[in-house]
Structure formats: C-alpha cells, structure tokens
Image (tube, rainbow, N blue to C red):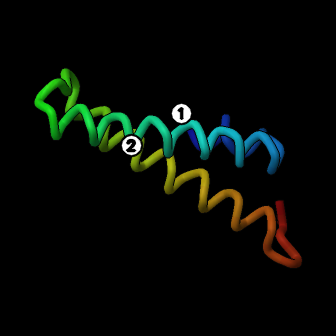
Amino acid sequence: MKASETRGMTPDQLSDRLGELKREQFNLRVQQATGQLENPARRRQVRRDIARIKTILGEKQAPGAGA
C-alpha cells in the first residue's frame, strides 16, 4: 500500500484498514510460531503499513493539519 493511496482514504476507512492489518499481523505471528509462515517478508510489510496508517491518521486528526 502506497502513502498516496492511504492519504486519499477517510479516517473511518483508515481505522477499518488498520484493524484488518492488525488481525493479519496477529495471524502472521501465529503462523511463524507454528512454523507455517510461507512469506516472512509479509510481516515486515504489514508492520510498515500499520505505521504508515497510524502516521496519516495522526496527521488528519492533528489540529491545524495542512492536508
């Protein structure tokens, strides 16, 4: 997910996507613990997507946000 795609989303959409990513992150952690994880790089990608969404949500909720 690119930052430009994320910035075009509403805060509600961002919150929903954040919930989906957190569930996926949990599932990936379980898969790794049980030795079933096929794509270890996906954990890193999900973690960064979560951080990206949290950053953009903070920007949108900040008072006097320029965007």
Quarter of image, res 43: top left
Instruction: Give how far across and how far down residue 61 sits, in percent.
Output: 80, 68
Report the residue that reaches farthest toward the right. 64
Q: Residue furthest left?
A: 35
Residue at image location 36% in from the left, 35% down from the top: 27
Q: CA distance from mark 1 to mark 2?
A: 19 Å
From this view, report whether residue 25 is shown above or below residue 64.
above
Q: Secondary structure at mark 1?
A: loop
| Residue 39 at x, y percent in the picture | 22, 25
Q: Residues within 10 Å of mark 1 (few under 14, many from 20)?
A: few
Q: Residue 35 placed where, x, y %? A: 11, 30
Disc 1 versus disc 2: nearer the observer: 2
Tell me: 49 left or right of 56: left
Quarter of the figure that contains the C terminus? bottom right
* Element carrying mark 2: helix
- 36 to the left or right of 27: left
Q: Of the residues under marks 1 and 2, which one precedes in the sequence? A: 1
| Residue at (67% x, 41% y) in the render | 6
Query: Do tag 1 and tag 2 residues touch (Cβ < 8 Å)?
Result: no
Residue that mark 1 sits on? 1
Query: Residue 50 at x, y = what percent?
Result: 51, 50
The amino acid beneath tag 2 is Phe
Residue type marked 1 = Met
Residue at coordinates 31% horizontally, 32% vertically from top-left? 42
* Residue at numbered disc 2: 26
Instruction: Give the camera-side residue of 55 and 32.
Output: 32
Task: State the image quarter where residue 3 is shown.
Answer: top right
Q: Using a 10 Å C-alpha cutoff, classify the residue at mark 2 as few (fewer than 14 neighbours), some (14 to 19) or many (20 or more).
A: few
Q: Which mark is residue 65?
A: none
